[in-house]
Image (cartoon, grey):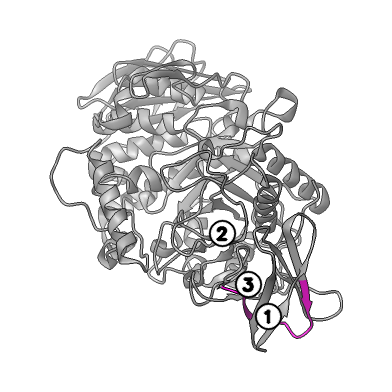
Amino acid sequence: MTLKTIFPVRSKDKGFTFNLWAPKASSVTLVTDFPQSEVPMNQQQYGYWSVTVPDASPGTRYKYELDGQHAFPDPASLAQPEGVHEASEVIALDSFEWTDNKWENIPLGEMIQYELHTGTFSPEGTFEGIISRLDYLLDLGVNTIELLPVVQFSGFCNWGYDGVYPFAVHQGYGGAKELMRLVDACHSKGMAVMLDVVYNHFGPEGNYMSNFGHYFSGKYSTPWGEPLNFDGAHSDEVRNYVIQNAVMWCRDFHMDGLRLDAVHAIFDFGAEHILKQLAGKLEELTTKTGKSYYLIAESHLNDVRYISPFSKGGYGLNAQWSDDFHHALHVLATGDRKGYYEDFGEPEQLSKAIRQAFVFDGVYSKYRKKTYGNSTKNSGGEQFVIFSQNHDQVGNRKHGERLISLSGFEMAKLAAGAMLVSPNIPMLFMGEEYGERNPFYYFVSHLDPELNQLVKEGRKNEFKKFFDDQEEVADPASRETFEQSKLSWNIHANSERRAMHAFYRELIRLRKTNPVLRLPDKDNLKITNTGKSFTLRRWQEGRQILVFMNFDQQPTEFEVPETMSGQLNKLVDSSAKQWKGPGEESPQQVSGGDKVKLTKEAILIYSN
């Protein structure tokens, strides 16, 4: 498949060439400002239109007039300075002066990911606000940030999954050049950048796609909007649109990879799935640039086909999120069994999630009322991203509570430890590293009041499945809801926050430096549990790690396995006073057969 350019690019001679896919139109006129003009476009094959405008330059505003009637913004706009309903703006993607020529991507298995929402991460709510805190993240030990979607959406605040211009960076965050500056700054500090993208649907407000072409087939549906047309008539050009978008982020914005939102809602029954085609195109880009790019899927299917290589009939993505790890951990930590959590609660499920990533790998689900999932036997630990919380699991709660608000301080430390000793890619959700207690709500700011009301009613109905209380749902369209979701920071003014931050910092340091923990090896691993008490052993070429985890509400006693050779030294005890714990009872050194006491809700790590 030869990709067709679909946004304005510099002409070889002078000005810019405008490109558009609009098969539904019998005529298209480019209407520009600065200078004002109306230029008929030339029809090409397969519904494409093109024209070169010598006077066009960065900053030129324009729309496309269809059949001499209505004019709309560009579906592949690179900038929407006045919002989703107004004119698009020409920008030059090749004008930024990059300084990351020597940058090489971080190996997937060595990533410590940090998921953040640009608008709520900093008081500024911009890319500049992130740049100002990169040294903080670097000191914490994070080497990869994952940005929630940053494409243009309606209003001033949104999670980003209601974007309607997939090529345009949200103006309120700083726009395209500021995003480039953020990526360049990250690379200069040795940090990778992953971008969350949405290829299963587009948002409702400012969505003029159907006026131009057959972006939606009408054959399928999602809970969030009509899915894209990847397998019906005219689907070649929709596939071109999406692949061009992914390539743009990696080629022009120097992203190190993409997190693909809800791939289970990407419907494609064609001979070559769009995700496989996308992975193939990024492989081609790697060959051209010499740099690797990662594709990480979010999926509810527990299907390793997404991450299996082409040679095994897979789609060739690099990794996928493991919700099962989160769910097993969450239920043990909080006791919550509502909604999809009803499938979890057995301690053995956490053991299985640590060992195999998927709990449901071909077993029956009470919640889904069916068998689902398949085996991860042939998939490496680096192919699964795990977390104790993320934007969905916090923000889709009725009151937006973070884990620490549900479980308490000691259990939150234990959950962090369980994640960082597991053989997968750990991902933190912004603020958890210092015990942020501000909620993270779902928020929107649509310009249409009726649309805001529909969102509010939809959230209220959704929560009825999970929550019995009659408290009013936080209004997603309220400015207060957005402001309450911002990180409060002020770490050093609070002893609990200082202790949590120091604890995370030490866990991440161990994760990155210990020769056993730093490898995502799920084969050299054994985990057993007695009730809510877990013993985890990992080993690598003579080096050993022994971890005790107590999720119970009572202290417990562990026995060091006889198979542990030699003497082991204590690395971390979450109950220690230095982490603001109740006080440790564990010895500094142990050997096989020794008894070890551990307080309730605590994690203990030994190594030789």
- Of residues 37 and 426, which is closer to you in this image? 37
Three-letter code, disc 2: Met
> What is the CA distance from the residue labelled 3 to the residue labelled 2?
12 Å
Estimate the x, y position of residue 280 in percent, counting from the top left. Answer: 74, 41
Estimate the x, y position of residue 158 in percent, counting from the top left. Answer: 40, 60
Whichever of callouts 3 and 2 sits on the residue coming sooner in the sequence is 3
Query: Which residue, given by chain and number where applicable, does mark 3 sit on?
Result: 64
> Magenta stretch: residue 62 in it?
yes
- Of residues 313 and 128, which is closer to you in this image? 313
Estimate the x, y position of residue 114 in percent, counting from the top left. Answer: 48, 50
Estimate the x, y position of residue 583 in percent, counting from the top left. Answer: 24, 37
Q: Residue 119's quadrant in the figure? A: bottom left
Q: Are marks 3 and 2 in contact (CB under 8 Å)?
A: no
- Of residues 191 and 464, which is closer to you in this image? 464
Please tell me whether residue 498 is drawn above or below residue 309 in the rendered image. Answer: below
Residue displayed at 48% across by 54% down: 148
Residue displayed at 33% across by 30% down: 340
Callout 1: SS: loop
Residue 58: which numbered mark, if any?
1
Residue displayed at 68% across by 70% down: 28
Which is closer to the viewer, label 1 or label 2?
A: 2
Residue 588: which numbered mark, if any?
none
Q: Residue 547's quadrant in the figure? A: top left
Query: Which residue, given by chain and number where applicable, does mark 2 sit on?
Result: 209
Please tell me whether residue 412 is drawn above or below residue 568 in the rendered image. Answer: below
Q: Are marks 1 and 2 in contact (CB under 8 Å)?
A: no
Please tell me whether residue 412 is drawn above or below residue 40 in the rendered image. Answer: above
